[in-house]
Image (cartoon, rainbow, N blue to C red):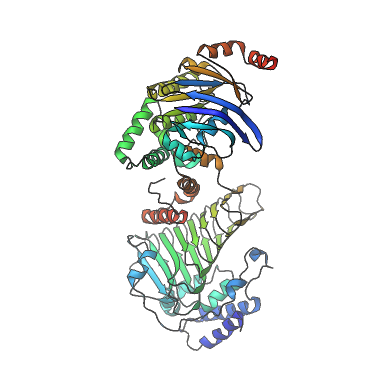
């Protein structure tokens, strides 16, 4: 049976057992499965999927629901968390919330699980206002998530609240089912004048095949600030299709930093929608991969209002037979005068077989704007390498040092010191050197 | 200390050095002069081990060891230092961290422990102050946005930190004003002792007024065509290179 048919028939079968949800969500799910049924999985014939072929990862007999509850011990997952960081924690095992690994709160804010929010009437107003509001309804994969998503993070921050510690969201898959498809779903609502930091990671604990089709919606109200960090360093059997949508109101500041270090196939769809003037959006991405992996970044910044800014820098280091895709779309609509949009994509190919398809895509319909973009693809600078070696730095370290220096621009603004340290360590590890100093 | 015998080198199949013989004894200062395109920078790159240059014939011995098969870093560990004509800009690595990494890499190669951070910092500050280098300069990215003079001064700073046995100054004087030139010369002279050797590659004799060479060689079309004492530099400054070129044509 084809995966698509299997998905449709299990959707019908699970209807009877599903946790009751409010009518709005039920209707959303019904619409979503119709859209998925109509459209199916995207193929390379679609412009947005031209360079990323999903067929190889769809040829598996995925389980769509976990058959049994697997318990995971804290010591087995410690390394995937920033354990030294005082934080709220939302941890899911095979798509199911693990209350004993997590640390939630309802004091003055809600940092808890989506399944509760979807079923409890007291959250009804927030759900009806925000859930599924910016996720594009006609996108097949987001629709698939909407139809199947049972749980995920639910974060609701009321007005003028500085969330005192970061939130770590960790999705684990245990490999109890040899091939597993997951649909994590996060809803983050940050009210006027509030501030929150979030770190998200998807992690498989075995070498089994996992496909996560994740959707995150972030709503940043007037004068709010959201810092979102995504760590993508999974096992080689794990694939991730991530959809992250942010809606920003007047004078809000949102940043999404994506660190892509390992995974069989990773596709990031990251869309920013401006809903008021004076908004600032930051998109940063760092990709370092070897072997035969594929990492695809598709971003969109939709400038609809005047006096908004967006800054986008994506850097990639590709070794082995890896493939990278960068497609950065910036739309500046006719009302978005005085927009300042900046985009940059720099890539280093370390081997002859590695390749990158990069496509900056700016569409500007306003006449009083400042927009720039640049993109480079190259190799390590041999003159710089000789310079370092002539000072006694061995070739391997010299190469790593140059690559580290290349990544610096992405790392400099990480506001959580423990996270910055961890990312530094991950990079040294990827570059196979022990670089102890701060750059 | 440095002994070059019948050295031929080419880049991309183009012969550049065509039979160089040169011997420099410990404590000596030699200068190599010559018109543009005569092979001066190639010679310095070949001694430092740049891989784009292919040595087709001859040998280079440093303290009795044939170094032609050694990597650039191994040559650096032996104590060979090349002050670059065009130091490379490397954004993202600070001057301090670069020099720390370089000093410790050489120590490691010699079987020494890393220099303790406090000692390193003290040495960096002392040497920088000596060369009139501002503290802020040390935390800037290596050579990025440096003026020509700052780049050259940074090279000399690295030299005094690494304390090499053989220093090759590849057109270190070009682009320097008189004050910077004097500081560079001071740095070199301070390092110079009975065992240290300096090879100066230059177009002009003005650096040689501050660092007086024991021998001056004229490189032309990949060969040393004339050698002499320090007065040869003044003679060249006065007469230019044409008289040497003519002399070669007639022979």
Q: Quadrant of the N terminus of chain B?
A: top left
Residue A37, percent across and down? Answer: 63, 79
Residue B86: tell me if it is visible.
no
Point 41% across, 67% down: residue: A169
Residue B12, percent across and down? Answer: 65, 38
Looking at this view, is B100 or A186 the one in front?
B100
> Is residue A323 depicted above or below A174 in this figure?
above
Looking at this view, is A178 or A94 the one in front?
A178
Q: How many marks?
A: 0
Looking at this view, is A116 or A84 the one in front?
A84
Residue B98 location, quadrant: top left
Residue B43, percent across and down? Answer: 56, 29
Point 42% across, 62% down: residue: A199
> Is residue B90 depicted above or below B40 in this figure?
below
Residue A439, percent across and down? Answer: 42, 45
Residue B21: tell me if it is visible.
yes
Point 51% across, 29% down: residue: B147
Q: Quadrant of the C terminus of chain B?
A: top right
């Amino acid at each position: 049976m084809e995966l698509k048919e299997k998905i449709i028939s299990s959707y019908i079968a699970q209807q009877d057992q599903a946790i009751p949800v409010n009518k709005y969500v039920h209707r959303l799910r019904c619409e979503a499965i119709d859209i998925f049924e109509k459209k199916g999985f995207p193929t390379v014939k679609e412009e947005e999927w031209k360079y990323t072929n999903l067929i190889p990862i769809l040829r598996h007999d995925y389980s769509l629901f976990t058959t049994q509850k697997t318990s995971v011990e804290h010591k087995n997952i410690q390394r995937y968390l920033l354990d030294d960081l005082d934080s709220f924690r939302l941890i899911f095992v095979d798509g199911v919330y693990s209350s004993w690994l997590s640390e939630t709160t309802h004091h003055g804010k809600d940092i808890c699980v989506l399944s509760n929010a979807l079923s409890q009437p007291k959250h009804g107003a927030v759900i009806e206002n925000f859930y599924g509001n910016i996720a594009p309804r006609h996108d097949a994969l987001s629709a698939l998530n909407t139809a199947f998503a049972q749980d995920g993070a639910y974060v609701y921050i009321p007005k003028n609240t500085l969330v005192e510690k970061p939130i770590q969201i960790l999705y684990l898959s245990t490999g109890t089912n040899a091939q597993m498809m997951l649909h994590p779903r996060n809803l983050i609502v940050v009210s006027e004048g509030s501030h929150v930091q979030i770190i998200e990671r998807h992690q498989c604990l075995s070498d089994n095949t996992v496909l996560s089709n994740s959707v995150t919606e972030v709503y940043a109200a007037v004068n709010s600030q959201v810092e979102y960090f995504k760590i993508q360093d999974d096992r080689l059997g794990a694939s991730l299709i991530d959809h992250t949508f942010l809606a920003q109101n007047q004078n809000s500041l949102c940043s999404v930093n994506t660190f892509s270090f390992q995974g069989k196939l990773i596709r990031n769809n990251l869309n920013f929608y401006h809903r008021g003037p004076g908004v600032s959006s930051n998109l940063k991405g760092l990709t370092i991969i070897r072997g035969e992996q594929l990492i695809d970044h598709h971003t969109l910044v939709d400038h609809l209002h005047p006096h908004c800014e967006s800054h986008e820098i994506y850097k990639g280091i590709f070794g082995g037979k890896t493939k990278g895709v960068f497609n950065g779309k910036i739309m500046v609509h006719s009302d978005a005068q005085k927009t300042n949009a900046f985009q940059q994509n720099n890539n280093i190919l370390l081997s002859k077989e590695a390749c990158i398809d990069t496509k900056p895509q700016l569409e500007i319909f306003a006449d009083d704007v400042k927009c720039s973009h640049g993109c480079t693809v190259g190799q390590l600078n041999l003159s710089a390498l000789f310079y370092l070696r002539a000072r006694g730095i061995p070739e391997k370290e010299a190469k790593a040092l140059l690559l580290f220096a290349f990544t610096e621009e992405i790392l400099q603004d990480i506001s959580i010191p423990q996270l910055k340290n961890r990312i530094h360590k991950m990079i040294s590890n990827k570059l196979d050197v022990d670089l102890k100093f701060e750059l | 200390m440095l002994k070059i015998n019948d050295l031929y080198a080419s880049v991309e199949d183009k012969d550049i050095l065509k039979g160089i013989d040169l011997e420099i004894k410990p404590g000596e200062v030699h200068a190599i002069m010559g018109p543009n395109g005569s092979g001066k920078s190639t010679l310095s790159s070949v001694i430092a081990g740049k891989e784009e240059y292919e040595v087709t014939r001859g040998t280079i011995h440093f303290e009795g060891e044939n170094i032609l098969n050694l990597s650039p870093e191994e040559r650096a560990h032996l104590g060979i230092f090349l002050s670059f004509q065009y130091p490379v800009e490397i954004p993202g690595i600070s001057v301090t961290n670069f020099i720390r990494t370089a000093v410790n890499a050489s120590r490691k190669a010699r079987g020494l422990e890393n220099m303790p951070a406090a000692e390193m910092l003290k040495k960096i500050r002392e040497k920088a102050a000596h060369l009139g280098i501002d503290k802020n300069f040390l935390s800037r990215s290596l050579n990025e946005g440096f003026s020509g003079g700052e780049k050259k001064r940074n090279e000399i700073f690295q030299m005094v930190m690494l304390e090499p046995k053989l220093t090759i100054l590849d057109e270190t004087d070009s682009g320097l004003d008189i004050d910077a030139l004097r500081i560079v010369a001071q740095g070199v002279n301070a390092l110079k002792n009975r065992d240290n050797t300096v090879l100066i590659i230059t177009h002009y004799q003005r650096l040689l007024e501050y660092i007086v060479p024991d021998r001056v060689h004229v490189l032309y079309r990949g060969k040393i065509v004339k050698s002499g004492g320090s007065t040869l530099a003044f003679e060249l400054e006065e007469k230019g290179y044409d008289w040497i070129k003519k002399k070669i044509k007639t022979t």
